[in-house]
Amino acid sequence: MMLLALAALAVARAEVEVLTEATFAPTTAAALRGGRRCFVKFYAPWCGHCKKLEPVWADLAAQAGADVLVAKVDATQHPRLAKTYGVKGYPTLVFLAGHQMQNYRGGRKLDELVAYVNEGYKSGENAQAAPTPPGPPTALEELLGKSTLGKDFRNIVKFEKGAAGVLFGLGVAVGLLVAALVSCCCCPRPSKVKGA
């Protein structure tokens, strides 16, 4: 009997859909086209509130039924997606129904979440037009996103606007200096004509 209960719990936890920047748009669009609703948790792996919500979120996926896609997005790995959906803290719970989006601000207990996905969302509280999710990152964005240099540059641009301007100016100055050195060293100088 205990084994059966553990197997049922494992199945319930497996029903939470893990979304990325590449899978978010097609997965949610297909669900919405099929008349389903989507409840998405944007989380950070280190967040204590997110960790506490994890088992409740898995139970919600098991109880929500076929009409609701319960999903999660690691916002630290997919910052463009998090920005598009206005994530400013963790966890952020976003409910999508039709072309509408609502930020869930209610309780985090299972019965409160189930009541919301079944009927509560219909109040339309804080409903707004759902944004268009960003497409998959380009190869350059993936490269910069995975490199330490790319993360450092992104943080500088995000948090230190003045520093970003200084870095840009330094880049231009270094580029001009290199161009001047190359033209001086590599370009032949015209020879002087004697007696002309």
Image: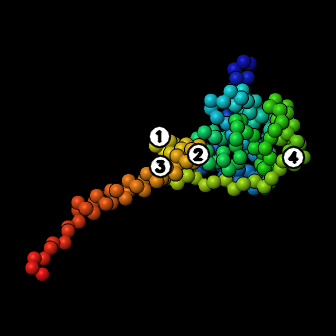
Q: Quadrant of the C terminus?
A: bottom left
Amino acid type assigned to the residue bearing label 4 in the image:
Glu
- Which quadrant of the rendered structure holds the N terminus? top right
Q: Residue at x 10, y 76 (%)?
A: 194
**Residue under the image location 49 percent in, 49 percent down:** 166
Pair 4/3: label in front: 3
Report which residue position mark 2 lands on. 158
How far apart marks 1 and 2 lie (CA) works out to: 15 Å
Q: Quadrant of the rendered structure where residue 17 is? A: top right
Label at residue 148: 1
**Residue bearing the label numbered 3:** 167
Q: Nearer the viewer, mark 4 or mark 2?
A: 2
Residue 97 is labelled as none
View extreme (front): residue: 195
Q: Which circle's residue, 1 or 3, is located before the other in the chain?
A: 1
Tag on residue 125?
4
Q: Position of residue 15 (x, y in %)?
A: 70, 37
Which circle, 1 or 4, is nearer the viewer? 1
Q: Secondary structure at mark 2?
A: helix
Q: Residues within 10 Å of mark 1 (few under 14, many from 20)?
A: few
Please state which amino acid type lies under the numbered disc 2.
Lys
What amino acid is found at the position of numbered circle 3 in the picture? Leu
Closer-to-camera residue (183/9): 183
Q: Residues within 10 Å of mark 3 (few under 14, many from 20)?
A: some
Image depth: mark 1 or mark 3 in front: 3
